[in-house]
Image (tube, helix red, strand yellow):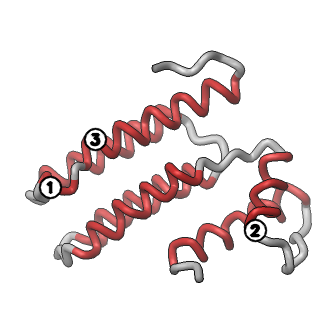
Amino acid sequence: MLDRVDERRVEAAWLALGMARGELPPENMSEQEIFAELAARGIHWDLPTMNLVSRIERAIVRLELNSQAEFVSLLNTLQVQLESGDPDPRVITLLGEALLALARARGLPDKLGLPAKLEIINQRIADSSARHRGDSPTR
């Protein structure tokens, strides 16, 4: 069974595929078929990276912070960039920096490991962007 975040992601993929086709895809398409069709149309989703963003969001929500909505807003914006299928590494980096600045401003404990997780996201997006441009990924 898909959790709420996964259902949102599949719904967004389904709608993205519809926009790529100029029509909505059949409702009986499986998640794998939707993602394969998106990839065939040049819309590349990095599911492990999207899942990492979802895990960060769930960890922040579990903290029940008064400022939770501020964090969720930034994470949703990050997720939308990933769902675009062609996220700009500069935008991803800036959103990550904004998230870290907010964490510092709100006194969020570093036990979540945000800097390391955001570095993983930045590296994956940079590598993915390089692959789609035909460059060699940085490592």
SS for callout 2: helix
- Residue 112, position as x, y percentages in the image: 21, 56
SS for callout 1: helix
Which label sits in the foreground, 2 or 1?
1
Residue under numbered circle 1: 111
Lateral position of residue 131 relative to residue 42, left or right: left
**Three-letter amino acid code at the position of disc 3:** Ala
Which label sits in the foreground, 2 or 3?
3
Q: Give the quadrant of the N terminus.
A: bottom right
Q: Residue at x 25, y 75 (%)?
A: 62
Instruction: Give the CA separation, mark 3 to mark 1.
Output: 11 Å
Q: Earlier in the sequence, mark 2 or mark 1?
A: 2
* Dot 3 alpha-carbon crowd within 10 angstroms: few under 14, some 14 to 19, many 20 or more: few
**Three-letter amino acid code at the position of disc 2:** Trp
- Residue 128, position as x, y percentages in the image: 60, 33
Query: Looking at the rendering, which quadrant does residue 109 occupy?
Result: bottom left
Q: Earlier in the sequence, mark 2 or mark 3?
A: 2
SS for callout 3: helix
Is the C-beta separation of discs 2 and 1 under 8 Å?
no
Lateral position of residue 107 relative to residue 12, left or right: left
* Dot 2 alpha-carbon crowd within 10 angstroms: few under 14, some 14 to 19, many 20 or more: many
Q: Residue at x 74, y 47 (%)?
A: 43
Q: Which mark is residue 80?
A: none
Q: Is residue 5 above or below residue 138?
A: below
**Three-letter amino acid code at the position of disc 1:** Lys
Residue under numbered circle 3: 116
- Residue 101, position as x, y percentages in the image: 21, 46
Q: Earlier in the sequence, mark 3 or mark 1?
A: 1
Q: Which mark is residue 14?
A: 2
* Dot 1 alpha-carbon crowd within 10 angstroms: few under 14, some 14 to 19, many 20 or more: few
Taking the view exactly as shown, the residue that stands out farthest to the front is: 1
Lateral position of residue 98 relative to residue 128, left or right: left
